[in-house]
Image (spheres, rainbow, N blue to C red):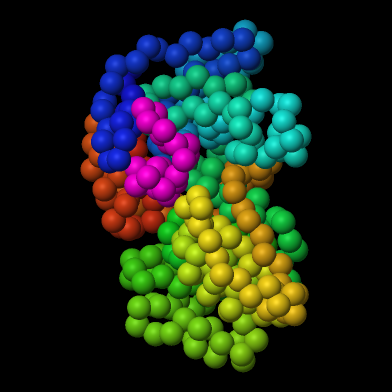
Amino acid sequence: MKVATWRGESRFTIDEAPEPAAGPGQVVVAVHAAGICGTDIHATQGLFPWTPPLVLGHEYTGVVREVGRGVSRRLLGRAVACEPSYGCGECAACEVGRISQCQRAVRVGGFAERVALPATCVHPLPRSLDATTAALTEPAACCLAGLETFAMPRGATVLVIGGGIMGLLTMAIARRRGAKRLILSDPIEERRRIARRLGAHVVIDPSRESLSDRVMGLTKDRGADVVCEAVGKPELVAEAISLTRMTGYVQLVGVNPKGSRLPLDLWDVHYRELRIGGAFGRGTAFRRALALMPKLGVKRLITARFPLERIGEAFAHAAAGHGAKTVIAPSGAVGR
């Protein structure tokens, strides 16, 4: 079978690999769609601590083609969303359901024609959810896990800085969780158009107007109840803090490069009683996110599809900021 191996920087090779087999408690999944995540791009730019050679891709769906001993045969032929890693089950991270932070986690890259996973990592799709859109489940679970760390204030104004996939999914989920006014800021017009279709009440181009002036004008100088920084830049995190109202929440959705530093006025945080939280990984939210997916209206967020053989081109497309989500179709499902 074919896999796309990341060789460092922006280099990929298409290689032949042994066919995976379903061991006890495992399944083999033919990958239908695998999304390119921002962390995949960051890895190719030297901004994320992964070491090549490696098969990337952790946002994927597929069809169960083989089941191992102890796994129900009812899964055969089912379309499933896949959790791409499983933990050791013994460390502090695993004890609290944070598999993404387990130092001994096994990660199974989805830029391959087929993968073997524990049966506990695959979840049948709701009937109303197609297998390509379902590739958004993993990033949606990360966004949901972050938003579940606090109760959405009644009638909340939510500001999302960054209209990439994490920002757009955060906005869609915030709406489902009771946000009343959604503001999104992004310099790319295509992303602002998508945000409008998803229900943003206000979209802002920060390259043409002051984000601070606009948000403070909209909120009568109070700031937003919740501000989600979904880009992963320290300077935007600082701006997010400044635009949060007293007793409000700052959610760090975008992954800042390791070693990033933030000049922080601790008096300001203390005085305004701000809550600043990180959101890294899906935690225990994957099943809840999958159930929520048909209600989010996010099918149009899949804006480009490439076959496995064109993965280098696909990464260049995604890294250039085109559209919302670029997916790889290892099994040849381009255009579906």
- The picture places residue 228, in percent across and down from the top left corner, at 57, 66
Q: Which quarter of the rendered picture does the N terminus lie within?
A: top left
The residue that appears at 67% across and 64% down in the rendered structure is 276
**Residue 240, quarter of picture:** bottom right
Magenta span of residues: 37-59
Indicate the quadrant where residue 70 lies: top right
**Residue shown at 34% from the left, 68% from the top:** 188
Residue depicted at x 61% and y 10%: 24
Q: Considering depth in this image, is 314 or 262 the residue closer to the camera?
A: 262
Queried whether the magenta region covers residue 173, the answer comes back as no
- Location of residue 313 in the rendering, given as x and y in whole percent from the top left corner: 23, 43
Dominant secondary-structure state across the stretch colored magenta: loop
User: Where is the C terminus found, in terms of image quarters?
Assistant: top left
Q: Is residue 211 left or right of residue 92?
A: left
| Residue 45, magenta (yes or no) | yes
Q: Is residue 81 above or below residue 116?
A: below
Q: Is residue 73 above or below residue 144?
A: above
Compare residues 54 and 72 and report the one nearer the observer.
54
Residue 311 horizontal/vertical position (percent): 28, 37
Asked whether residue 247 is in view, the answer is: no
The image shows residue 293, relative to residue 107, as above or below, that is below
Q: Position of residue 3 (x, y in %)?
A: 34, 24
Judge whether 251 appears above or below 61 on screen: below
Residue at figure coordinates x 61%, y 71% from the top left: 264
Q: Nearer the viewer, residue 52 or 26?
A: 52
